[in-house]
Image (cartoon, rainbow, N blue to C red):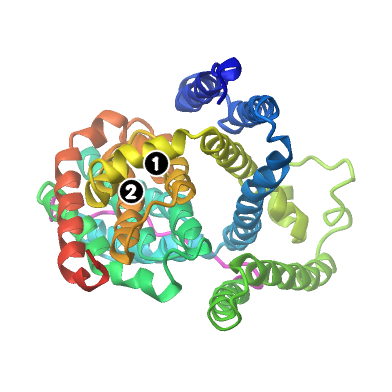
Protein backbone atom coordinates (compact mmCIF):
# COMPACT_ATOMS: atom_id res chain seq x y z
CA UNK A 1 0.00 0.00 0.00
CA UNK A 2 1.16 3.57 -0.73
CA UNK A 3 2.18 5.81 2.14
CA UNK A 4 -1.16 7.63 2.25
CA UNK A 5 -3.15 4.46 2.77
CA UNK A 6 -0.77 2.45 4.93
CA UNK A 7 -3.41 2.49 7.66
CA UNK A 8 -5.72 0.29 5.60
CA UNK A 9 -3.80 -2.96 6.16
CA UNK A 10 -3.80 -2.68 9.97
CA UNK A 11 -7.44 -1.53 9.93
CA UNK A 12 -8.46 -4.64 7.97
CA UNK A 13 -6.58 -6.81 10.44
CA UNK A 14 -8.34 -5.13 13.39
CA UNK A 15 -11.78 -5.61 11.80
CA UNK A 16 -11.05 -9.28 11.17
CA UNK A 17 -9.78 -9.88 14.72
CA UNK A 18 -12.80 -8.11 16.27
CA UNK A 19 -15.20 -10.18 14.18
CA UNK A 20 -13.42 -13.39 15.05
CA UNK A 21 -13.44 -12.48 18.74
CA UNK A 22 -17.24 -12.31 18.55
CA UNK A 23 -17.29 -15.68 16.77
CA UNK A 24 -15.11 -17.17 19.50
CA UNK A 25 -17.50 -15.79 22.16
CA UNK A 26 -20.62 -17.20 20.47
CA UNK A 27 -21.32 -19.69 23.26
CA UNK A 28 -21.28 -16.94 25.90
CA UNK A 29 -23.01 -14.03 24.17
CA UNK A 30 -25.35 -16.15 21.96
CA UNK A 31 -24.70 -14.05 18.86
CA UNK A 32 -24.75 -16.30 15.79
CA UNK A 33 -21.29 -16.53 14.29
CA UNK A 34 -22.43 -15.56 10.79
CA UNK A 35 -23.49 -12.02 11.75
CA UNK A 36 -20.17 -10.43 12.75
CA UNK A 37 -18.20 -12.01 9.89
CA UNK A 38 -20.74 -10.90 7.29
CA UNK A 39 -20.42 -7.32 8.49
CA UNK A 40 -16.64 -7.64 8.69
CA UNK A 41 -16.46 -9.02 5.13
CA UNK A 42 -18.18 -5.96 3.70
CA UNK A 43 -16.10 -3.50 5.76
CA UNK A 44 -12.88 -5.26 4.77
CA UNK A 45 -13.66 -5.11 1.06
CA UNK A 46 -14.66 -1.45 1.31
CA UNK A 47 -11.25 -0.80 2.86
CA UNK A 48 -9.58 -2.88 0.13
CA UNK A 49 -11.43 -0.82 -2.50
CA UNK A 50 -10.21 2.43 -0.92
CA UNK A 51 -6.64 1.17 -0.97
CA UNK A 52 -6.83 -0.10 -4.55
CA UNK A 53 -8.36 3.17 -5.73
CA UNK A 54 -5.59 5.18 -4.09
CA UNK A 55 -3.03 3.03 -5.91
CA UNK A 56 -4.81 3.32 -9.27
CA UNK A 57 -5.83 -0.36 -9.26
CA UNK A 58 -9.58 0.09 -8.94
CA UNK A 59 -10.27 -1.99 -12.06
CA UNK A 60 -8.66 -5.04 -10.42
CA UNK A 61 -11.06 -5.07 -7.49
CA UNK A 62 -14.14 -6.45 -9.26
CA UNK A 63 -12.29 -9.38 -10.82
CA UNK A 64 -10.56 -10.23 -7.55
CA UNK A 65 -13.78 -10.10 -5.52
CA UNK A 66 -15.67 -12.20 -8.08
CA UNK A 67 -12.93 -14.82 -7.94
CA UNK A 68 -13.29 -15.08 -4.16
CA UNK A 69 -17.07 -15.16 -4.45
CA UNK A 70 -16.87 -18.00 -7.00
CA UNK A 71 -14.95 -20.09 -4.46
CA UNK A 72 -17.75 -19.52 -1.95
CA UNK A 73 -20.56 -20.14 -4.44
CA UNK A 74 -19.24 -23.58 -5.41
CA UNK A 75 -18.87 -24.50 -1.76
CA UNK A 76 -22.32 -23.12 -0.89
CA UNK A 77 -24.16 -25.09 -3.59
CA UNK A 78 -22.38 -28.31 -2.69
CA UNK A 79 -23.16 -27.93 1.01
CA UNK A 80 -26.76 -26.87 0.37
CA UNK A 81 -27.35 -30.17 -1.41
CA UNK A 82 -25.48 -32.32 1.12
CA UNK A 83 -27.19 -30.69 4.11
CA UNK A 84 -30.61 -31.10 2.48
CA UNK A 85 -30.05 -34.83 1.99
CA UNK A 86 -28.87 -35.27 5.57
CA UNK A 87 -31.83 -33.27 6.92
CA UNK A 88 -34.22 -35.40 4.87
CA UNK A 89 -32.68 -38.57 6.31
CA UNK A 90 -33.15 -37.10 9.79
CA UNK A 91 -36.78 -36.15 9.05
CA UNK A 92 -37.53 -39.62 7.64
CA UNK A 93 -36.13 -41.21 10.80
CA UNK A 94 -33.22 -43.10 9.22
CA UNK A 95 -30.76 -42.02 11.91
CA UNK A 96 -33.32 -42.74 14.64
CA UNK A 97 -33.60 -46.27 13.29
CA UNK A 98 -29.81 -46.64 13.49
CA UNK A 99 -29.88 -45.41 17.08
CA UNK A 100 -32.71 -47.80 18.00
CA UNK A 101 -30.87 -50.79 16.56
CA UNK A 102 -27.77 -49.93 18.56
CA UNK A 103 -29.83 -49.64 21.72
CA UNK A 104 -31.18 -53.16 21.19
CA UNK A 105 -27.71 -54.72 21.07
CA UNK A 106 -26.87 -56.48 24.32
CA UNK A 107 -23.31 -55.25 24.78
CA UNK A 108 -21.08 -54.30 27.68
CA UNK A 109 -20.39 -50.64 28.30
CA UNK A 110 -16.98 -51.06 26.71
CA UNK A 111 -18.52 -52.87 23.74
CA UNK A 112 -20.99 -50.03 23.21
CA UNK A 113 -18.12 -47.57 23.51
CA UNK A 114 -16.21 -49.26 20.67
CA UNK A 115 -19.27 -49.70 18.44
CA UNK A 116 -20.27 -46.05 18.81
CA UNK A 117 -16.76 -44.82 18.04
CA UNK A 118 -16.37 -47.13 15.05
CA UNK A 119 -19.73 -46.06 13.59
CA UNK A 120 -18.78 -42.40 14.03
CA UNK A 121 -15.57 -43.05 12.10
CA UNK A 122 -17.43 -44.89 9.30
CA UNK A 123 -20.43 -42.54 9.09
CA UNK A 124 -18.60 -39.19 9.04
CA UNK A 125 -16.99 -39.64 5.59
CA UNK A 126 -20.52 -39.61 4.12
CA UNK A 127 -22.49 -37.45 6.55
CA UNK A 128 -20.91 -34.36 8.10
CA UNK A 129 -19.11 -34.67 11.43
CA UNK A 130 -21.77 -32.54 13.16
CA UNK A 131 -24.65 -34.91 12.33
CA UNK A 132 -22.47 -37.92 13.11
CA UNK A 133 -21.51 -36.52 16.51
CA UNK A 134 -25.12 -35.70 17.40
CA UNK A 135 -26.42 -39.17 16.46
CA UNK A 136 -23.62 -41.12 18.15
CA UNK A 137 -23.52 -38.73 21.13
CA UNK A 138 -27.22 -39.31 21.72
CA UNK A 139 -26.66 -43.06 21.64
CA UNK A 140 -23.77 -42.74 24.11
CA UNK A 141 -25.87 -40.71 26.54
CA UNK A 142 -28.79 -43.15 26.35
CA UNK A 143 -26.73 -46.33 26.53
CA UNK A 144 -24.17 -45.23 29.13
CA UNK A 145 -26.19 -42.62 31.02
CA UNK A 146 -25.67 -44.32 34.37
CA UNK A 147 -21.90 -43.89 34.20
CA UNK A 148 -20.72 -40.31 33.77
CA UNK A 149 -17.08 -41.29 33.20
CA UNK A 150 -18.13 -43.69 30.44
CA UNK A 151 -20.34 -41.04 28.79
CA UNK A 152 -17.49 -38.52 28.81
CA UNK A 153 -15.03 -41.05 27.43
CA UNK A 154 -17.44 -42.12 24.69
CA UNK A 155 -18.16 -38.49 23.80
CA UNK A 156 -14.45 -37.70 23.43
CA UNK A 157 -14.02 -40.81 21.28
CA UNK A 158 -16.98 -39.79 19.10
CA UNK A 159 -15.54 -36.31 18.49
CA UNK A 160 -12.11 -37.69 17.55
CA UNK A 161 -13.63 -40.44 15.38
CA UNK A 162 -16.00 -38.06 13.57
CA UNK A 163 -13.18 -35.64 12.76
CA UNK A 164 -10.74 -38.42 11.79
CA UNK A 165 -13.29 -40.18 9.60
CA UNK A 166 -13.98 -36.98 7.72
CA UNK A 167 -10.29 -36.40 6.99
CA UNK A 168 -9.95 -39.16 4.37
CA UNK A 169 -13.06 -38.26 2.35
CA UNK A 170 -13.82 -35.21 0.19
CA UNK A 171 -17.35 -35.29 1.65
CA UNK A 172 -16.30 -35.70 5.28
CA UNK A 173 -15.29 -32.15 6.14
CA UNK A 174 -15.49 -28.64 4.72
CA UNK A 175 -11.69 -28.47 4.52
CA UNK A 176 -11.39 -31.67 2.47
CA UNK A 177 -14.17 -30.42 0.20
CA UNK A 178 -12.33 -27.13 -0.40
CA UNK A 179 -9.06 -28.92 -1.14
CA UNK A 180 -10.82 -31.28 -3.56
CA UNK A 181 -12.71 -28.50 -5.35
CA UNK A 182 -9.45 -26.57 -5.78
CA UNK A 183 -7.91 -29.63 -7.43
CA UNK A 184 -5.02 -29.89 -4.98
CA UNK A 185 -5.92 -33.52 -4.20
CA UNK A 186 -7.86 -35.81 -6.52
CA UNK A 187 -10.86 -37.78 -5.23
CA UNK A 188 -9.16 -41.17 -5.07
CA UNK A 189 -6.04 -39.79 -3.40
CA UNK A 190 -7.89 -38.85 -0.21
CA UNK A 191 -8.19 -42.52 0.70
CA UNK A 192 -4.44 -42.91 1.23
CA UNK A 193 -5.15 -41.02 4.46
CA UNK A 194 -7.42 -43.82 5.73
CA UNK A 195 -4.86 -45.53 7.96
CA UNK A 196 -3.33 -42.30 9.33
CA UNK A 197 -6.87 -41.10 10.15
CA UNK A 198 -7.71 -44.47 11.71
CA UNK A 199 -4.61 -44.33 13.93
CA UNK A 200 -5.54 -40.78 14.91
CA UNK A 201 -8.73 -42.18 16.47
CA UNK A 202 -7.51 -45.60 17.64
CA UNK A 203 -4.63 -44.33 19.80
CA UNK A 204 -6.73 -42.11 22.12
CA UNK A 205 -9.70 -44.49 21.86
CA UNK A 206 -7.60 -47.41 23.16
CA UNK A 207 -6.31 -45.32 26.05
CA UNK A 208 -9.78 -44.04 26.99
CA UNK A 209 -11.20 -47.57 26.72
CA UNK A 210 -9.18 -48.58 29.79
CA UNK A 211 -11.48 -46.37 31.89
CA UNK A 212 -14.72 -47.82 30.46
CA UNK A 213 -16.21 -50.63 32.61
CA UNK A 214 -16.81 -54.07 31.09
CA UNK A 215 -20.11 -54.74 32.82
CA UNK A 216 -23.35 -55.16 30.89
CA UNK A 217 -25.03 -51.88 29.94
CA UNK A 218 -28.75 -51.75 30.81
CA UNK A 219 -30.50 -49.90 28.01
CA UNK A 220 -34.14 -49.33 27.28
CA UNK A 221 -35.32 -50.72 23.97
CA UNK A 222 -37.06 -48.28 21.67
CA UNK A 223 -39.18 -48.84 18.58
CA UNK A 224 -38.64 -46.54 15.63
CA UNK A 225 -40.24 -46.81 12.22
CA UNK A 226 -38.51 -45.21 9.25
CA UNK A 227 -40.96 -43.00 7.37
CA UNK A 228 -41.95 -43.76 3.84
CA UNK A 229 -39.14 -43.19 1.36
CA UNK A 230 -36.38 -42.96 3.97
CA UNK A 231 -34.27 -45.74 2.50
CA UNK A 232 -34.94 -44.46 -1.02
CA UNK A 233 -33.52 -41.06 -0.03
CA UNK A 234 -30.46 -42.80 1.44
CA UNK A 235 -29.97 -44.58 -1.88
CA UNK A 236 -30.43 -41.31 -3.78
CA UNK A 237 -27.79 -39.66 -1.61
CA UNK A 238 -25.27 -42.40 -2.35
CA UNK A 239 -26.15 -42.26 -6.05
CA UNK A 240 -25.68 -38.48 -6.02
CA UNK A 241 -22.23 -38.85 -4.49
CA UNK A 242 -21.28 -41.51 -7.06
CA UNK A 243 -22.55 -39.32 -9.92
CA UNK A 244 -20.69 -36.28 -8.60
CA UNK A 245 -17.42 -38.20 -8.38
CA UNK A 246 -17.89 -39.69 -11.86
CA UNK A 247 -18.63 -36.33 -13.49
CA UNK A 248 -15.61 -34.79 -11.80
CA UNK A 249 -13.28 -37.64 -12.75
CA UNK A 250 -14.46 -38.23 -16.34
CA UNK A 251 -15.68 -34.83 -17.54
CA UNK A 252 -13.89 -32.57 -15.00
CA UNK A 253 -17.20 -30.95 -14.08
CA UNK A 254 -17.03 -29.08 -10.72
CA UNK A 255 -18.55 -31.20 -7.91
CA UNK A 256 -21.34 -28.75 -7.10
CA UNK A 257 -23.13 -29.54 -10.39
CA UNK A 258 -23.56 -33.23 -9.62
CA UNK A 259 -24.74 -32.45 -6.11
CA UNK A 260 -27.29 -29.90 -7.34
CA UNK A 261 -28.60 -32.42 -9.85
CA UNK A 262 -29.13 -34.79 -6.93
CA UNK A 263 -30.87 -32.05 -4.99
CA UNK A 264 -33.22 -31.50 -7.92
CA UNK A 265 -33.95 -35.24 -8.02
CA UNK A 266 -34.68 -35.12 -4.28
CA UNK A 267 -37.12 -32.28 -4.94
CA UNK A 268 -38.87 -34.34 -7.61
CA UNK A 269 -39.11 -37.34 -5.29
CA UNK A 270 -40.38 -35.12 -2.47
CA UNK A 271 -43.27 -34.10 -4.75
CA UNK A 272 -44.24 -37.77 -5.02
CA UNK A 273 -43.98 -38.22 -1.24
CA UNK A 274 -46.02 -35.09 -0.52
CA UNK A 275 -48.85 -35.88 -2.92
CA UNK A 276 -49.17 -39.48 -1.74
CA UNK A 277 -48.87 -38.67 1.96
CA UNK A 278 -51.33 -35.78 1.74
CA UNK A 279 -54.09 -38.14 0.64
CA UNK A 280 -53.74 -40.11 3.87
CA UNK A 281 -53.77 -37.14 6.28
CA UNK A 282 -56.68 -35.26 7.88
CA UNK A 283 -57.69 -32.07 6.11
CA UNK A 284 -55.36 -29.19 6.90
CA UNK A 285 -52.23 -31.14 7.73
CA UNK A 286 -50.88 -30.58 4.23
CA UNK A 287 -51.37 -26.80 4.29
CA UNK A 288 -48.84 -25.00 6.49
CA UNK A 289 -50.68 -21.71 5.87
CA UNK A 290 -53.71 -22.84 7.86
CA UNK A 291 -53.94 -21.71 11.47
CA UNK A 292 -53.22 -25.09 13.05
CA UNK A 293 -51.30 -25.36 16.31
CA UNK A 294 -47.77 -26.17 15.17
CA UNK A 295 -46.96 -28.58 17.98
CA UNK A 296 -44.91 -31.76 17.76
CA UNK A 297 -47.95 -33.85 16.88
CA UNK A 298 -48.79 -31.59 13.94
CA UNK A 299 -45.17 -31.55 12.77
CA UNK A 300 -44.97 -35.35 12.90
CA UNK A 301 -48.18 -35.83 10.92
CA UNK A 302 -47.81 -33.19 8.23
CA UNK A 303 -46.97 -34.25 4.69
CA UNK A 304 -43.38 -34.07 3.51
CA UNK A 305 -42.44 -30.72 1.94
CA UNK A 306 -39.16 -30.19 0.10
CA UNK A 307 -38.85 -26.52 1.07
CA UNK A 308 -39.43 -27.32 4.72
CA UNK A 309 -36.21 -29.34 4.49
CA UNK A 310 -34.40 -26.38 2.95
CA UNK A 311 -35.58 -24.24 5.88
CA UNK A 312 -33.75 -26.60 8.26
CA UNK A 313 -30.41 -26.18 6.49
CA UNK A 314 -27.73 -24.66 8.73
CA UNK A 315 -28.02 -21.18 7.24
CA UNK A 316 -25.92 -19.71 10.03
CA UNK A 317 -23.09 -22.02 9.00
CA UNK A 318 -23.46 -21.30 5.28
CA UNK A 319 -23.47 -17.54 5.85
CA UNK A 320 -20.52 -17.89 8.23
CA UNK A 321 -18.58 -19.49 5.38
CA UNK A 322 -19.50 -16.53 3.17
CA UNK A 323 -18.15 -14.05 5.69
CA UNK A 324 -15.00 -15.99 6.50
CA UNK A 325 -14.06 -16.68 2.88
CA UNK A 326 -14.51 -13.02 1.92
CA UNK A 327 -12.62 -11.85 5.02
CA UNK A 328 -9.69 -14.13 4.25
CA UNK A 329 -9.83 -13.07 0.61
CA UNK A 330 -9.56 -9.44 1.73
CA UNK A 331 -6.52 -10.26 3.88
CA UNK A 332 -4.96 -11.86 0.82
CA UNK A 333 -5.75 -8.83 -1.36
CA UNK A 334 -3.65 -6.52 0.84
CA UNK A 335 -0.73 -8.95 1.10
CA UNK A 336 -1.09 -10.42 4.59
CA UNK A 337 -1.45 -13.98 3.33
CA UNK A 338 1.66 -13.64 1.19
CA UNK A 339 3.61 -12.51 4.25
CA UNK A 340 2.21 -15.38 6.30
CA UNK A 341 3.07 -17.86 3.54
CA UNK A 342 6.66 -16.65 3.45
CA UNK A 343 6.94 -16.85 7.24
CA UNK A 344 5.42 -20.32 7.58
CA UNK A 345 6.30 -22.20 4.43
CA UNK A 346 9.56 -20.55 3.40
CA UNK A 347 10.83 -19.83 6.88
CA UNK A 348 9.97 -23.11 8.62
CA UNK A 349 9.27 -25.58 5.84
CA UNK A 350 6.01 -27.10 4.66
CA UNK A 351 5.97 -30.01 7.13
CA UNK A 352 6.31 -27.80 10.21
CA UNK A 353 3.86 -25.28 8.73
CA UNK A 354 1.15 -27.88 8.01
CA UNK A 355 1.52 -29.50 11.43
CA UNK A 356 1.28 -26.06 13.05
CA UNK A 357 -1.87 -25.20 11.09
CA UNK A 358 -3.45 -28.44 12.26
CA UNK A 359 -2.66 -27.62 15.89
CA UNK A 360 -3.97 -24.07 15.46
CA UNK A 361 -7.27 -25.45 14.17
CA UNK A 362 -8.03 -26.57 17.73
CA UNK A 363 -8.39 -22.88 18.64
CA UNK A 364 -9.14 -21.19 15.31
CA UNK A 365 -11.69 -22.67 12.92
CA UNK A 366 -10.00 -24.92 10.36
CA UNK A 367 -12.04 -23.44 7.50
CA UNK A 368 -10.39 -19.98 7.40
CA UNK A 369 -7.00 -21.59 8.02
CA UNK A 370 -7.41 -24.00 5.11
CA UNK A 371 -8.85 -21.33 2.82
CA UNK A 372 -5.93 -19.07 3.73
CA UNK A 373 -3.44 -21.76 2.67
CA UNK A 374 -5.35 -22.38 -0.55
CA UNK A 375 -5.32 -18.66 -1.25
CA UNK A 376 -1.60 -18.40 -0.46
CA UNK A 377 -1.03 -21.47 -2.68
CA UNK A 378 2.48 -22.19 -1.41
CA UNK A 379 4.69 -24.41 -3.53
CA UNK A 380 4.16 -27.87 -2.04
CA UNK A 381 4.33 -31.40 -3.34
CA UNK A 382 1.39 -33.80 -3.20
CA UNK A 383 2.50 -35.31 0.08
CA UNK A 384 2.35 -31.93 1.79
CA UNK A 385 -1.14 -31.16 0.49
CA UNK A 386 -2.24 -34.51 1.85
CA UNK A 387 -0.54 -33.67 5.15
CA UNK A 388 -2.46 -30.39 5.31
CA UNK A 389 -5.68 -32.29 4.56
CA UNK A 390 -4.96 -34.66 7.45
CA UNK A 391 -3.85 -32.11 10.05
CA UNK A 392 -6.58 -29.56 9.27
CA UNK A 393 -9.16 -32.33 9.54
CA UNK A 394 -8.04 -33.94 12.80
CA UNK A 395 -6.30 -31.08 14.62
CA UNK A 396 -9.60 -29.68 15.86
CA UNK A 397 -10.04 -32.75 18.06
CA UNK A 398 -7.39 -31.48 20.47
CA UNK A 399 -9.96 -29.21 22.12
CA UNK A 400 -13.73 -29.52 22.40
CA UNK A 401 -14.16 -26.10 20.79
CA UNK A 402 -11.95 -27.03 17.84
CA UNK A 403 -14.67 -28.63 15.71
CA UNK A 404 -18.40 -28.52 15.08
CA UNK A 405 -18.62 -32.06 16.47
CA UNK A 406 -17.17 -31.00 19.81
CA UNK A 407 -19.29 -27.87 20.11
CA UNK A 408 -22.44 -29.84 19.26
CA UNK A 409 -21.74 -32.48 21.90
CA UNK A 410 -21.08 -29.85 24.56
CA UNK A 411 -24.61 -28.59 23.95
CA UNK A 412 -25.95 -32.13 24.03
CA UNK A 413 -23.90 -33.36 26.96
CA UNK A 414 -26.08 -32.01 29.80
CA UNK A 415 -23.04 -31.06 31.84
CA UNK A 416 -21.23 -34.38 31.32
CA UNK A 417 -19.16 -33.59 28.26
CA UNK A 418 -17.54 -30.20 28.84
CA UNK A 419 -14.46 -28.27 27.73
CA UNK A 420 -12.60 -29.34 30.88
CA UNK A 421 -13.69 -32.98 30.55
CA UNK A 422 -12.32 -33.08 27.00
CA UNK A 423 -9.15 -31.24 28.03
CA UNK A 424 -8.24 -34.08 30.41
CA UNK A 425 -7.82 -36.34 27.38
CA UNK A 426 -5.97 -33.84 25.16
CA UNK A 427 -2.65 -35.53 25.89
CA UNK A 428 -3.99 -38.84 24.52
CA UNK A 429 -5.48 -37.11 21.47
CA UNK A 430 -2.12 -35.39 20.90
CA UNK A 431 -0.44 -38.81 20.83
CA UNK A 432 -2.90 -39.89 18.15
CA UNK A 433 -2.25 -36.65 16.23
CA UNK A 434 1.51 -37.29 16.26
CA UNK A 435 1.04 -40.98 15.34
CA UNK A 436 -1.18 -40.14 12.37
CA UNK A 437 1.36 -37.65 11.01
CA UNK A 438 4.23 -40.10 11.45
CA UNK A 439 2.27 -42.86 9.70
CA UNK A 440 1.44 -40.57 6.78
CA UNK A 441 5.08 -39.54 6.38
CA UNK A 442 6.12 -43.21 6.26
CA UNK A 443 3.23 -44.84 4.36
CA UNK A 444 2.84 -42.08 1.77
CA UNK A 445 6.50 -41.18 1.39
CA UNK A 446 6.26 -41.65 -2.39
CA UNK A 447 3.97 -38.60 -2.57
CA UNK A 448 6.81 -36.40 -1.27
CA UNK A 449 9.16 -35.25 -4.01
CA UNK A 450 11.53 -33.27 -1.82
What crowding class fits label 1: few (fewer than 14 Cα within 10 Å), some (14-19), or many (20 or more)?
many
Left or right placement of residue 305 versus residue 421 in this view? right
Q: Nearer the viewer, residue 264 or 287?
A: 264
For the residues labelled 1 and 2, the Cα–Cα distance comes to: 8 Å
Which residue is more in the foreground, 230 or 49? 49
Residue 357, image quadrant: top left
Find out whether the residues at labels 1 and 2 contact each other: C-beta distance under 8 Å: yes
Q: Quadrant of the N terminus?
A: top right
Residue at x-position 23% and y-position 68%: 195
Magenta stretch in the rendered image: 212-230
What label does residue 133 carry, if any? none
In the picture of the structure, the residue carrying the numbered disc 2 is 159
> Which comes sooner in the sequence, label 1 or label 2?
2
Q: Residue 380, how many percent across, how many down?
A: 33, 58
Farthest residue to the bottom: give it.
250
Q: Residue at x 27, y 41 (%)?
A: 359
Q: Is residue 78 magenta?
A: no
Count of numbered tags: 2
Q: For mark 1, what is the residue?
A: 409
Find numbered disc 2 in the image and state the secondary structure of the residue it sits on. helix
Residue 226: x and y in percent read 57, 68
* Labels 1, 2: front one: 2
Q: Main secondary structure of the magenta part?
A: loop
Is residue 222 shown in magenta? yes
Residue 60 at x, y percent in the picture: 69, 42
Q: Is residue 264 visible?
A: yes
Above or below, 406 relative to 203: above
Q: Nearer the viewer, residue 110 or 407?
A: 407
Specify few, some or many for label 2: CA neighbours under 10 Å numbering under 14, 14-19, or 20 or more. Answer: many
Amino acid sequence: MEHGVQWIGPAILVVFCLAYALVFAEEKIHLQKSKPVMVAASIIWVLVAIGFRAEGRAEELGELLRHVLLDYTELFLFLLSAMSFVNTLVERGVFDELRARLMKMRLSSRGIYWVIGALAFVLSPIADNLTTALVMGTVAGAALGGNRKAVVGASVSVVVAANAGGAFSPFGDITTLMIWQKGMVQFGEFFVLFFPALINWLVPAAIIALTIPKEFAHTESMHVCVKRGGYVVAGMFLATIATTVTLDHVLHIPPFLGMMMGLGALGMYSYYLRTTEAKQLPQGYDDPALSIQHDEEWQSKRAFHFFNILEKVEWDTLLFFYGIILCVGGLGAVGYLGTLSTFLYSGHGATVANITIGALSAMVDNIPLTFAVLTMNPVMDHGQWLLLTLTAGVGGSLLSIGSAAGVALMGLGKGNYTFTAHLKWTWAILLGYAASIALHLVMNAHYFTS
